[in-house]
Image: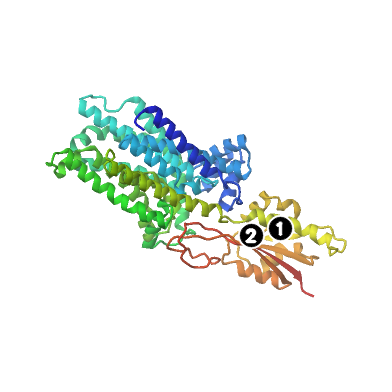
Amino acid sequence: MNTRPQRILLLSALMLLAFALRWVDISTESLWVDEIYSYRQAIKPIANIIANSQADVHPPVYYILLHCWAMLFGTSEAGLRGFSLFCGVLAVPLMYLLGKRVWNPRIGMIAAFLLAISHFHIHYSQETRSYSYLVLVSIGGMLGFMRLWDEIRENIRTGNTTLISRQTALLFVFAHILLLYSHFFALFLVVAENVFVASLWFFRKDVFLRFWKRWFILQVVLLLIFTPWLNVLYWQIQAVQQGFWIDRPTVFVLGETLVEYCGSLLASLVMMPLLVLAFVEIRSQNSRNAEGKATMLYRIQSSEPLHIWFLWLCVTLTILIPFVKSLKGTPIYYVKYTIPALPAFLLLVAKGVDAWEWRRWYGKIATGGVLLALAAIAAYNTRNDWNALEKERWRDAAVYLAGLHSSEHSSGNSSGNTAKELVFVHDWYCWYNLAYYGASTTTELHALPPERLRITSETWQRLYASRIAGREQIYLVLSHRTGKTQAILDGIERDFTRLSDTVFPSRYRKYVVSDSFPQQTRAIFLMKTYLSNDIRVIRYKRKI
């Protein structure tokens, strides 16, 4: 791996590995509710996507890119999820470049390998949501910042008065535009960068005094570019203050987050010690470089402690800022939202893997053994992932509904009535899932009103009595159970008797904590975070 062709060959192999791990099983499971929302946005004209973004909690760039992608590759499960796969594979070489810039090509290659086999990253590279894209632009933003920082240090060292070249400044701004317009939690990486620059007052005051004005100008430019979204962001924050679906986190969520980054509880037993080893190795290496005269000032002024300090800020602030905010106000902390911190976390682990004396035989054996162990654990986790049904099974439910009408007629129970079966969908947004899989063409599909509309006997009579009239049997698709569920069941069961209840289960997997969603069994699972809901299709017959 010492020559450029060797590194290109190895990096190409890692990209092929990343593609294979993300492509297999990509269309096995149904699109779940959030993925269908992404689909609904992607099929709109771009002008409508931008206009609708004010009602969303995420900026519109991801949906615009997904719109363009869908025009080329279609709106099947594989077509839609293919954009996340593309971002996931493209993140691997960028991860290498980031590791190479922070430390050296060897650590960059290790970090790229860790990202390629990351169970956390693989999962969101197979989902039609913005998280894989968010990892990609997070790496790009960190790479832009590190290039800026390295150029400043080098120009100060050589006495060059042009601290930042125009090309570097433009790349930095472009990378951060993509970052800022990707996800609300991406802002915490920008906070980490500003904390790092501010800390230079204590660590490298000479650099700070020569650099801060240019940095301030760059931040003003970013702020001006981000200004169109600030008003929307303000109203989104105000809306969230009125209430949000996320539970208030406990201290166990922090542990769950780290296990999520590792990929599993077993992987965390290997990777967490490597984080500690990365810090120990930096300290001992600085001592060796200083020939036994290392002081705190020397360790601070050398490049590697500053690099590790920056990565540490990216991890901790992206996690702790929303965590503390969730303790003091409306909860916003959810593990997958913190995924911008994943690249920095894996870089620190890669540094720990490389901590042994690489040129000595025992160092090569130790490094290879650790990488093989992580690869074996990742293979085990990924295989379990392929064999599990995690996402809501809307395709199966739609196929079941499609067979209702034909089965009634084939059994001779239709009594000459050729009307489609009447199906109520418990939550209005779940209507789109069934419609995507064709249920609206085979059944008379109606969505119940949103949560904000209180279900009473009067509203039930006014909205649905005419549809139920003359029906001997109806169906209810029940998912995402809420406070209005019992009122809906009571309204139906005044006139109808429950005949059957068909359940399409999927796994609800957590590490060390569980969400308090009413439809879920509260338990501890040593797997990974995922909110998944069972789907029930209940058949009712009119009372005699």
Residue 134 at what x, y percent from top left?
Answer: 45, 43
Q: At label 2, which amino acid type do we have?
A: Pro
Q: Is residue 445 left or right of residue 340?
A: right
Q: Is residue 239 left or right of residue 458?
A: left
Provide the residue designation for mark 1: 400
Q: Earlier in the sequence, mark 1 or mark 2?
A: 1
Residue 282 at what x, y percent from top left?
Answer: 24, 44
Q: Count the marks: how many?
A: 2
Q: Quadrant of residue 79?
A: top right
Q: Residue furthest front?
A: 361
Q: Residue furthest bottom?
A: 544
Query: Which of label 1 and label 2 is nearer to you?
Result: 1
Q: Quadrant of residue 229?
A: top left
Q: Is residue 127 left or right of residue 474?
A: left
- Helix, strand or loop at mark 1: helix
Residue 537, placed above or below residue 320: below
- Helix, strand or loop at mark 2: loop
Q: At label 1, which amino acid type do we have?
A: Tyr
Residue 330 at what x, y percent from top left?
Answer: 42, 59
Q: Quadrant of residue 359?
A: top left
Q: Which residue occupies the foreground of this view, 270 or 174?
A: 270
Callout 2 crowding tier (Cα within 10 Å): few <14, some 14–19, many ≥20: some
Give the quarter of the figure containing the C terminus.
bottom right
Q: Examine the rendering and report whether any part of residue 191 can be seen.
A: no
Q: Examine the rendering and report whether any part of residue 335 can be seen.
A: yes
Residue 121 at what x, y percent from top left?
Answer: 46, 47
Q: Are marks 1 and 2 in contact (CB under 8 Å)?
A: no
Give the quarter of the figure containing the N terminus.
top left
Q: Which residue occupies the foreground of this view, 319 or 470?
A: 319
Provide the residue designation for mark 2: 449
